[in-house]
Image: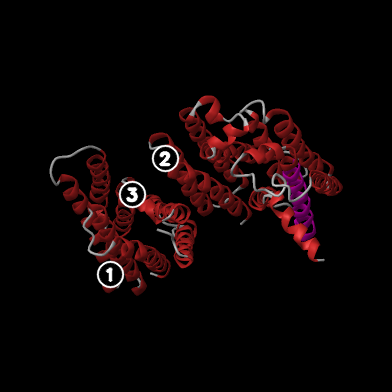
Amino acid sequence: MKSFFSKLLHYLPLIKGLQTGLLVATGLAGYLSARCPIFNMGTIAGLFVSLFLSISGSTVLNMWYDRDIDAKMGRTKKRPLSSGIVSDGEVLRLGLTLSLLGVGLAAAMDALYGLIIFAGLFFDVVVYTIWLKRKTCWSIVWGGISGGMPILAGRVLGLGGFDWIGIILSLGILFWIPTHILTFSMKYYDDYKAAGVPTFPSTYGFDATRAVIAISSVIAAFAMGIACWGIGMTFGYLRILIVLSAGLLTLAVATLLRPSEQVNFGLFKYASLYMLSSMILIMA
Amino acid sequence: MKISILDRVLLLITCLLAAYQIGFVIDGFSTLPMIAYTIAFGVLLVSGLLIILLGIEVLESPVVVIVATMIPLTLSLGLVWQHLESFKVLYLVFAIIGFFAILVTRSFPMPGRLPTIVLALVHGIAGMTIFLLPIFLSIQGLTRPLFSLVGIGGALIGIGGLALSFLKAGKPILSKEIILKILPVILFSMTLCFVAGFKYG
């Protein structure tokens, strides 16, 4: 029993709790945004579990595939896999099991919902991680598309089909992801360089990266605003969203005009908080 | 300087109170006061979040003087627009000119004490309006007694502003550590007074 818990503790960092939690929150927000007549706790529980399993599964598979990169980067070399605490085979089996369970449960709940969850996992693991991450800095577009899948899937599960709001919500996440990832890749520039992973800062320079962050922040905030208006969010909640979006845009502009490590990392943290707050407003 | 857990909690509650004010309390106000209060409490909300995320040192940025001006200016503009019919356009002009005057004097090199005089004048008028107008209105019976809490919030914002100004001037009356330590408490108390005053006043 003791060894089981000890093993579990080693596995926990493999699922990146905060990132997975944020993506699960987007899926729940997508579902609740539909305000559907079939709203019930059973479906919400199924949605939560299927999203948690599939997102955790894809994260574990990413870690498994990127173990050689992680071992070269100061920030990640102490992760359980790259430091050799858990074995490659175990992690691969865990990732595949979680992914299969997550996608299987999703498909059992609703075929279209399951298909979108599968697409998210496929884009993340196969297209982003295995195919493009080591070849081009533009791989983050596919990472972004994958990140936009949970909210789209949730919305589709609630509505029973696609609509423009689901697409825009998903675009909001897609354009939020560069803000999140690019600020991170600037902060850990040397790490990525050492590992040979192409990033926007190493390919196009810091100024161009800051411009991309600012533009993507504007589009993300605009998309979230349009989608929330389309959902029928109350004017009071819209005002809060506008204020939070203004904060995001101000920080993005600040990274252009007064670039510094503090502003850069502030934007990274604020972007996560912004997305979580937006999801809470959608769910409320 | 590391922010304590208690300060983080206070700041988080401050942010939630500001969000509550923006989302609920000002519903039903006319357009200009609604915009003015949204800006005032919006600046408070985003600033609170940034302090939580980046630490209290974020207040040492030169941009803070300009951004912090927006709180008293827009708050006082909302109050005047709602309660002093005959002064509302005049005050709107003052608020716009005052903001741009601070923006210009803080963005470009200026001779002598001009930036300080402009800052003191604009903050002084806005601060006294927030402090005195709600108390005057509640004493006159034109609003409910609890509206005077907005005035108390105005006094607190004045204390916070003074502390920050002294810090920026490099001649603090209290040590930097003490000023940065009491700021979360001031921000929280001030926001609580504002929200309670607007809600129950």
Q: Position of residue A246 (x, y in %)?
A: 45, 44
| Chain part drawn in magenta | A38-61
Q: Tell me whether marks 2 and 3 sit on the same chain.
A: no
Three-letter code, disc 1: Ile
Q: Name which residue type carries label 2.
A: Ser
Q: Quadrant of residue B146?
A: bottom left
Secondary element under disc 1, as helix, strand or loop, is helix
The residue that appears at 15% across and 45% down in the rendered structure is B114
Image mark for residue A120: none
Q: Which residue is mark 2?
A: A260
- Badge 3 is on which residue? B64
Query: Which residue is disc 1 drawn over?
Result: B135
Q: Residue at x 67, y 29 (%)?
A: A134
Task: Please state the chain letter of the residue tagged with numbered disc 1 in the rendered image.
Answer: B
| Label 1 with label 2: CB-CB less than 8 Å | no
Closer-to-camera residue (A106/B154): A106
Determine the image quadrant of residue B155: bottom left
Prevailing secondary structure class for the magenta stretch in the rendered image: helix
Which one is in front, A201 or B195?
A201
Q: Amino acid at mark 3?
A: Val
On the question of residue B126 being in view, the answer is no
User: Which is more foreground, mark 2 or mark 3?
Assistant: 2
The chain ID associated with circle 3 is B
Magenta span includes B62: no
**Residue A56 belongs to the span the image colors magenta:** yes
Query: Which image quadrant: the C terminus of chain A?
Result: bottom right
SS at circle 2: loop
Mark 3: which secondary structure?
A: helix
Image depth: mark 1 or mark 2 in front: 2
Would you say A134 lies left or right of A254 here? right
